[in-house]
Image (spheres, grey):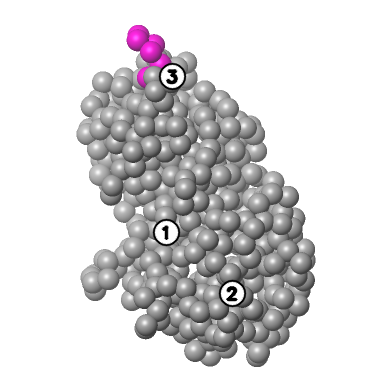
Amino acid sequence: MTAPLRIGPYAIERLLGVGSFATVWLGHDRALDAHVAIKVLAENWSHDLRVRERFLDEARLLRRLEHERLIRVHAVGELPDGRPYAVLAWADGGSLRDRLAVGEIPAPAALRLLGEVCAGVAVLHRHGVVHRDLTPGNILFRSAGPGGPEQVLIADLGLAKALAAASGLTARAGTPGYMAPEQDDPGAVVDTRADVYGLGRLGIRLLAADPSGANPTGPGPPRHAPEIRLRDDVPAAVAAVLAQATAHRPADRYADATTLHAALTRAGGPVAGTGGSGLTGRPVASTGGSAPAASPGRRRPSPRPAAGRPYRMRLAGVAVVAAVAVGAVGAESGGAGLARPVGGTYTAGPLTVALPPGWSATGATWAGQYGADGEPEPALVMSPEPRRWAVDPRLPGAFVGLSATTAARTTPAGFLAERTHGDCASAPARVTGQAGVEWTVVAYRCDRGRPQIIESAAQHPGRPAVVYVQIAPPADSGPAFVDTLLAGVRLR
């Protein structure tokens, strides 16, 4: 990967991290002589309206909360190619994942650290926010000056969601092994108790007698957790607290991070309290210079057959919310990946669409969605300028994707219930029959960005697959435009 020379006003010094959703660079503000971490949305997700919203929502949320226990946001901007970026405080002490990779943290310091993390998550809970992805990679350290205590920071809220929006059908999000059981259920309510589960799993990882056995090795939490065996120098009552925190049923857990923190303090004594000092994790060597981790997301499974594939495929499916994105362009034969001529129809794999007047299309893959063979599932984008429609809110356009893996876990209506737009008001879902296909359609009116976004999905009439169409219609159009576009989608 070639490092850019500059991002906005910041000189780029080196790469800090790469994830499925974002790349993080170390930047330098020469005017202030200060380092910053610059998180840039990954190119293969830049066409996805909802992922862009999520990326920017994280920055807005952190800016709104503005707390010493959370990673700070200084600014947001946009690259010349339209990708958004966020300028964040640089966590110069690295991440907890870095430190655990070097060696285990002594039990007293690990228990104090867990208390600090609980206190940080409690800030989110007091503001009605559920993080939903509490892992060692999202716990960061920042020096507070010569002789000062090290700050423990909660980062990477890209999967966080306001509690007000976390009722009814919610998006699947989280990292296997730290993710609460209900996060693997599209129909479950996700609240603060999901974070309590993640904190409990984090505590087990920090304090287990056999850390290798505490590492998550499966795609999700077991229904009946094995007995928790902690180190000999950990108070016995702490094991009972972590067992309750990681109970399978949310009702059996502590209510929130504050309640869990209080229970840990009672069980572990003053060692589990917080005061911003005494974290002896600092002397443990780290990789240094780590920034907020790029958003954890799906990793493409190996296309080679292997015994481990079922696990890797499941991991890809639950790591983040299912989201539409355009991956590597692979247009139909003769297209060379370029937009097709205006008018007529366009075919990409099993998808054929009738193009609205003045629109063209380009073939693509559905980034983050993989079939049973490990290959990305098919998709296409159409618009007057298909390569710019997702980054230019003035352009109408549509994404069309076909997914067998989505059909295996949910219905078209269930899939749409996962794809809400938090800053927009939705109309009641409607059903329309077009060209022998029954579509569920939900329209969103938005105060910023695109004024209207249409989410629609249907069952493939001939095989177990969900076809999904996200539409940004022309400003002067109505339901008739949407129905005509859906009527022009043909499936093989």
Report, in whole angstroms, how far the alpha carbon at label 3 lies from the one at label 2.
Answer: 47 Å
Count residues near mark 3 (Cα–Cα under 10 Å), then give few for <14, some for 14-19, many for 20+.
few
Q: Main secondary structure of the magenta part?
A: loop
385 vs 289, nearest the viewer: 385
Q: Amino acid at mark 1?
A: Asn
Q: Quadrant of residue 299?
A: bottom left
Q: Position of residue 75 (x, y in %)?
A: 53, 33
Residue 367 on the magenta segment: no
Can you say whether 132 is above or below 478 in the image? Answer: above
The residue that mark 3 highlights is: 32
Residue at coordinates 25% horizontally, 38% vertically from top-left? 101
Count residues near mark 2 (Cα–Cα under 10 Å), then give few for <14, some for 14-19, many for 20+.
many
The circle drawn on residue 359 is 2
For the record, the magenta segment spans 143-148
Q: Is residue 261 left or right of residue 215?
A: right
The residue that mark 1 highlights is: 44
Which tag, 3 or 1, sits closer to the chain's start? 3
> Which label lies toward us, 3 or 1?
3
Count residues near mark 1 (Cα–Cα under 10 Å), then give few for <14, some for 14-19, many for 20+.
some
> Which label lies toward us, 3 or 2?
2
